[in-house]
Image: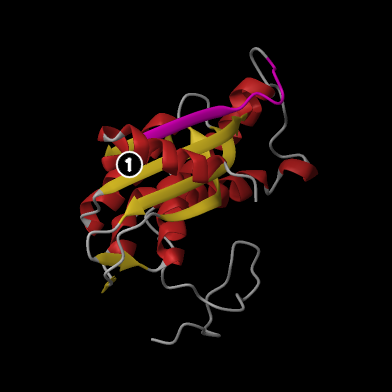
């Protein structure tokens, strides 16, 4: 099937898409009508009128947003790492500053930031864009940043049989900046080290130095 298609499919706003990304996570497993009904209940519960003009289409918009934000629940991000290339390269491969937006499972508020992925190949390398795709799909789930970081590291280690894997994520959490303690500018950093990056202090220091190096 071609990478680009001008079929009859439409996006959430009723506009035909310019292309169809066949690697995108599925959203058809989400019960949009149930989400719409729940949003109407919430609006009513907080004292709003879900039937006023400005809110009439809000439940449908929120339903489509949740289908998009949680699409990673219905996909296997590790599939992007199935296509590898034989390469006798045994130094660090690092992709920095992979942007992501995920949803905190405690308050269903977004946390946004960057992921940095490094690995030590053992005769196999993967396309760099595939690492970004893994981050994108793992992020599209309700979760905590700690689990997200570990999940990405485990997938890279398992599928590439890498001698070492390092994943560092840094993010700002809406549940800390817009509610509760309300501390804008606070940053959460998490890391997951596997293999040589966990066991060898020199390798760990080297990869962290590359991740923290100014561009």
The N terminus sits in image quarter: bottom left
Q: In the picture, residue 2 is in which quadrant?
A: bottom left
Colouring chosen for the image of the structure = secondary structure
Q: Is residue 94 above or below residue 168?
A: below
Residue range in magenta is 182-192
Which residue is depicted at the point 45% across and 54% down?
A: 94
Judge whether residue 76 can be spotted in this image. no
Q: Residue at x 32, y 39 (%)?
A: 197
Residue at image point 27% right, 44% down: 154
- Circle 1 is placed at which residue position? 151
Of 106 and 43, nearer the camera is 106
* Above or below 13: residue 73: above
Q: Is residue 26 left or right of residue 4?
A: left
Q: Position of residue 124 (x, y in %)?
A: 25, 66
Q: Nearer the viewer, residue 19 or 198?
A: 198
How many discs appear? 1
> In the rendered structure, does residue 159 fall within the stretch colored magenta?
no
Can see residue 132?
yes
Image x and y of residue 174, in percent: 63, 29
Q: Is residue 191 magenta?
A: yes
């Amino acid at each position: 099937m071609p990478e680009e298609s001008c079929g009859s499919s439409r996006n959430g706003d009723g506009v035909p898409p310019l292309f169809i990304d066949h690697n995108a996570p599925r959203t058809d497993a989400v019960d949009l009508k149930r989400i719409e009904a729940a949003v109407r209940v919430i609006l009513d519960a907080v004292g709003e009128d879900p039937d006023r003009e400005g809110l009439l289409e809000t439940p449908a918009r929120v339903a489509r947003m949740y289908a998009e934000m949680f699409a990673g629940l219905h996909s296997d991000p590790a599939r992007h790492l199935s296509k590898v290339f034989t390469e006798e390269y045994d130094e660090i491969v690092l992709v920095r500053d992979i942007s992501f937006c995920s949803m905190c499972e405690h308050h269903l508020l977004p946390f946004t930031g960057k992921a940095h992925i490094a690995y030590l190949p053992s005769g196999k390398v993967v396309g760099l864009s595939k690492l970004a795709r893994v981050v994108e799909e793992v992020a599209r789930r309700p979760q905590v940043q700690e689990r997200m970081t570990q999940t990405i590291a485990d997938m890279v280690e398992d599928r590439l049989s890498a001698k070492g894997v390092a994943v560092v994520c840094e993010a700002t959490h809406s549940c800390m900046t817009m509610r509760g303690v309300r501390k804008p500018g606070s940053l959460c950093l998490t890391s997951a080290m596997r293999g040589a990056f966990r066991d060898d202090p020199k390798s760990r220091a080297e990869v962290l130095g590359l991740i923290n190096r100014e561009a």
